[in-house]
Image: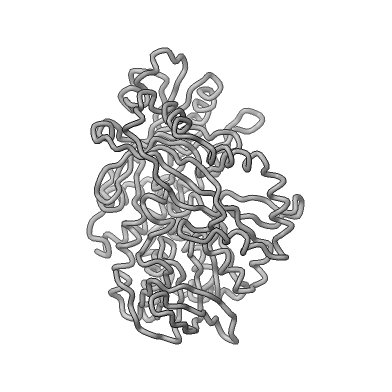
Amino acid sequence: MTTQTAQKTETDIILIGAGIMSATLGVMLKTLDPSLNIEIYERLDSIAAESSDAMNNAGTGHSAFCELNYTPQLQDGTVDISKAIKIAEQFEISKEFWAYLVEQKYISSTETFITQVPHLSFVWGDENVDYLKKRHAALSKHHFFKEMEYTEDKATLQKWMPLVMEGREGEAHVSATKMDLGTDVNFGSLTNTMFTYLKAQPGVTINLQHDVENIKRKSSGWSVKVKDLLSGQRRKVSAKFVFIGAGGGALPLLQKSGIPESKGFGGFPVSGQWLVCTDASVIKRHKAKVYGKASVGSPPMSVPHLDTRNINGKTALLFGPYAGFSTRFLKKGSLLDLFGSIKLNNIRPLMAAGLDNIPLTRYLIGQVMQSQEDRLASLREYYPNAKAEDWKLEIAGQRVQVIKKDPRHGGVLEFGTEMVTAADGTIAALLGASPGASTCVPIMVQLIERCFKDKVKTPEWQEKFKAMIPSYGQSLAKDATLANATRERTTKVLKIG
């Protein structure tokens, strides 16, 4: 996809960042109102090259089937499944919208972006096995997870995940759960497909290699200062609504807007690395996403997993991610990003969150200091017979976790996504990370409901929302009949049965 050169000075909508969030919002808005003019600005020379890229993104299709950090064990020994239910519902909504895109022929092939891959949770040791059994008992009572299987039988486990079980003959107590309905999602491919559709629509311009330098409020809407990185020319574009979906780069742009709602927000960058398998015979023997328990003090994005992925039409096998620390807010950002984000209004939250998260800092330093042998030792906890020569290290994406004001602690570090919108709904930004891309559809629906309140209430927009997301306005988490019918339909349309 090449840079388009139309030099508009006024538009209806500006989307900053050419990732999964902007793609989703762009398609939704153009569907709701085909007359809208939309300008998209991306600093890099290609679509989905940062957080949405297949190698940079977790790609799991986060549905809470296997991610143990979504189901914490409480002090009384019970397992809290409320977050898992919420995330599972959000992913079902995302699948509804993707099925709509397929039915409308905006997407020609589902295999390019979503494939069926079983999701497994795997633990060892008496305490962890007891936890996983309780987790399964709690989850399987809900209709989202009723098909979840649990076993401690080694013969069954050998069938589910042969690589993981080989070499564990002397290990006494292991267990796993499995959901066959799990998926792998290539968000880079999905994003490119949606932007290809958008590019063909009248009134939509995609500007690659354009850096947004400033955002200022006008009497009506916003003025966005943009630099063409090829020619060096700068221009200002006025818009009625601006969305900042620039991944880790969203926070500095939000701060430049000066809206009161941006005050007090800071960012804590966490980098990542993968071990990528290079042996085709090993890759062929594993078809699953096997998630374990995170190390004490580690961020949620660093939950270890042995992960079957579909990248550029080929099956890949990854292990990790190994966390690290960099002052960059983007993988291709500047080492000065973190320092530039420190303002008078967020110093206190940053300091408070830093003091409360000293164990996390120690953990990240330890991860940075790891040798290849240390990384292989972690891999062998999940694949005991792994050979060093079959794996290479590759850099994953950069995530910026949200730090925000807290009345009790001064500031807290949040592991999740945070939508920040101006009171008048004319500008919005998305901060944070996991589960991120997997929940892009309900997040963008929420954004539209906040920022286009009057239009959302009209019969025309209500009808179009229900066409894009048939369960819109209803609860899949509470209505088992609706949820089952929805899942059956999307499974068929997306060909993930």
Q: Quadrant of the C terminus?
A: top left
Taking depth in this image into account, of 257 and 337 the one nearest to the observer is: 337
Q: How is the image coloured?
A: one colour
Query: In x, y percent, where is residue 359?
Result: 65, 39
Which residue is drawn at the image coordinates 35% and 56% (left, top)?
Answer: 188
Residue pushed farthest right? 408
Taking depth in this image into account, of 147 and 347 the one nearest to the observer is: 347
Q: For this view, does 188 lie left or right of residue 472?
A: left
Which residue is drawn at the image coordinates 37% and 68% (left, top)?
Answer: 27
Q: For this view, does 171 lie left or right of residue 263?
A: left
Query: In x, y percent, where is residue 431?
Result: 55, 59
Taking depth in this image into account, of 385 and 24 the one nearest to the observer is: 385
Q: For this view, does 384 lie left or right of residue 69?
A: left
In the rendered image, is residue 463 in sight? no
Q: Quadrant of the N terminus?
A: bottom left
Q: Is 2 drawn above or below residue 366 in the view shown?
A: below
Which residue is drawn at the image coordinates 68% and 51% (left, top)?
Answer: 412
